[in-house]
Image (tube, rainbow, N blue to C red):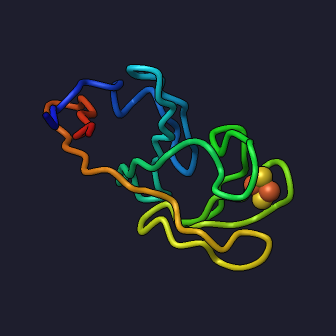
Amino acid sequence: ARTWVFACKVEDIRLQDVRRWEFDGHSYAIFRSPKGEIFVTDDICTHEHAHLSDGYVEGHTVECPRHSGRFSYMTGKALGAPVCINLRTYEVRIEDGAVTVLVP
Ligand code: FES
């Protein structure tokens, strides 16, 4: 069953940055945009094994630390070679500064 799970506080993530969140054996990346919106995707790149939470956030994109593939963390869209498979995204809710994620 899908469940809402508390992940972290909004203030734990700097603007235009990302934080890794491990839950139930799965690794998620929680992004905070330059304007402060929160988005959640899978943390592992769809190209090879690399943690996007170790990558570089610029605007609304993240660059993989391994081969510099880029994704939109808002939609999960792969933005060009070498990444061609979109990232999975997750629904998120913010309540009283708490980030809660709908996990599958
Ligand atoms: Fe991410 Fe290759 S592992 S671009």
As drawn, the residue found furthest toward the front would be 1
- Locate residue 7, reporting x and y percent: 33, 26
Q: How many marks?
A: 0
The relative height of residue 92 versus residue 58 in the rendered view (above or below) is above
- Locate residue 4, reporting x and y percent: 17, 32
Q: Is residue 59 shown left or right of residue 35?
A: right
Residue positioned 63% across, 39% down in the render: 53
In the foreground, 99 or 84: 84
Q: Quadrant of the N terminus?
A: top left
Q: Is residue 31 shown left or right of residue 24?
A: right
Residue positioned 71% across, 38% down in the render: 54
Residue positioned 64% across, 77% down in the render: 79
Picture quadrant of residue 44: top right
- Locate residue 65, reporting x and y percent: 80, 48
Q: Quadrant of the C terminus?
A: top left
In the foreground, 12 or 76: 76
Q: Quadrant of ligand 1?
A: bottom right
The relative height of residue 7 versus residue 72 in the rendered view (above or below) is above
Q: Is residue 101 shown left or right of residue 54?
A: left
The relative height of residue 23 versus residue 93 in the rendered view (above or below) is above
- Locate residue 100, reporting x and y percent: 23, 33
As drawn, the residue found furthest toward the right would be 67
Residue positioned 19% across, 43% down in the render: 93
